[in-house]
Structure formats: structure tokens, C-alpha cells
Amino acid sequence: MLRIGVCVSGGGTNLQAIIDKIESGEVTNAEIAVVVSNNPGAYALQRAEKHGIPAVCVSPKAFESREAFNTALVDTMDSFRIDLIVLAGYLVVIPPVLIERYRNKIINIHPSLIPSFCGTGNYGLTVHVNALKRGVKVTGATVHFVDEGTDTGPIILQKAVAVEDGDTPEILQRRVMEQAEWEILPKAIDLIANQKIRVADGRVVSRS
């Protein structure tokens, strides 16, 4: 059974999608062992508690140094014996020590078709603002492994979403979540939990 640690900063809609897919049996051989937030007021923590999932806050503000926070974050994942870390709207820079400790065991959901509208500064609603400014006709979401770069890790899954006339950033954000993020993030977890993919030469490939 794959033990998952989900990291969130806000409402946790992607967390809820994972919970729902596990409870429905669409994601198998996986369980959420802990939900971790940097924000003590994150509604995602309440979502976890409603489903009997341990929920903890590990905030950089609670530590004297960034190094102390980084150590605490690693220790938290280790203490829950985590096999896979899922970043689901986590607005904290992932420390290199965590990436090294969990190499190819951290995944992230990004609200665009990487390599478009990604990298430093492209997160949250800003991604959709930039997509609409550029006038793209198709956008989407990407699930990828996390490495030392920003949105540069091996891509696991992508799904396209049409941009419609009259879209605002908020409307487009919601459509991308509903049509792409909530589908491919749980699916990626299921692929990993059932050992259907692996990383080879910096790319994700199916296991033979």
C-alpha cells in the first residue's frame, strides 16, 4: 500500500479529488497517510480531518531558520513513513534536502501544459491570466515529478482543456481544475501505486 503525504496551502480541492477517487476505488493500492500544510488556516486541513486523515501544520514562520523548517518537513514525512509526496497547491519552495531524500517520489500538479506558462512566478491564477493574455486556444494541466528546477521534472500526465470566448482567469481556472487537474492527479497516483510507470533517462515511461 502506497503511503501518500499530500502538501497543500489552501482549500484543498485537488486533495478532495484524491480522497474521492481513493474512496470510490478508482485509485487503488494507495492511502493518504498525512496532509501537511504551511498554513494553519488552510481548509484542506479540515477536509483531511473530516475523512479521518492526520493533518498537521508545518509552517516556515514557526522556525528560526529555513534550514530548521526544511529539517522539520523531512522529519514529518519520514515519521509517517511516506512513499509518495503529492504537492496539491503547495505554495512553498521545496527544499533540496527533501527532493534528494524523496528522489522521483514527489509529484506536482501544474495548471498548464508544460512547458507553456510554467516556471518561476507562474502559479495559481497567474497561469491563467498569462494564458489568456497570450491568446492560446488550448490550455490544460500537467502532473510531473519534482526535481531541483521549477516545473522541470519528468512529465507523467497531461490533459488539454479548451479556452472559450469570454473566459476570465477565474472561469478558466475552474474549468482546468474540473476537466483536467481532478482527473489526472489521482490517475498519476494510481499509476505510481500500481508500479505502472518508471523514470528512465529523465523521462517517464511505462513499465514493460
Image: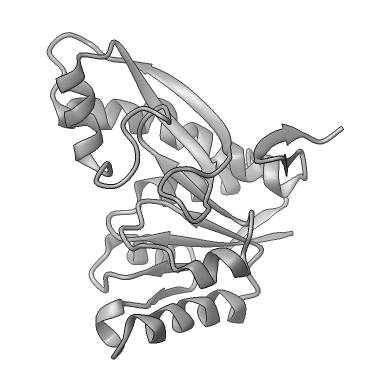
- Counting from the top left corner in percent of width and height, residue 13 is at 35, 47
Residue depicted at x 52% and y 33%: 184
Q: How many marks?
A: 0
Q: Is residue 136 left or right of residue 195?
A: left
- The part of the image, by quadrant, that contains residue 31 is bottom right
- Counting from the top left corner in percent of width and height, residue 69 is at 38, 81
Residue depicted at x 63% and y 60%: 103
Depth check: give the residue in front, 71 or 171.
Answer: 71
The N terminus: image quadrant: bottom right
- Counting from the top left corner in percent of width and height, residue 180 is at 43, 28
- The part of the image, by quadrant, that contains residue 118 is top left
Position of 148 relative to 197 (above/below): below
Q: Please say which color scheme the image uses.
A: one colour
The C terminus: image quadrant: top right
- Counting from the top left corner in percent of width and height, residue 60 is at 30, 78
Residue depicted at x 28% and y 91%: 64
Q: Is residue 194 left or right of residue 109?
A: right
Looking at this rendering, what residue extends furthest in the bottom direction? 64
Residue depicted at x 31% and y 31%: 117
Position of 165 relative to 171 (above/below): above
Position of 129 relative to 31 (above/below): above
Depth check: give the residue in front, 13 or 39.
Answer: 39
Q: Is residue 50 left or right of residue 148?
A: left
Looking at this rendering, what residue extends furthest in the right direction? 208
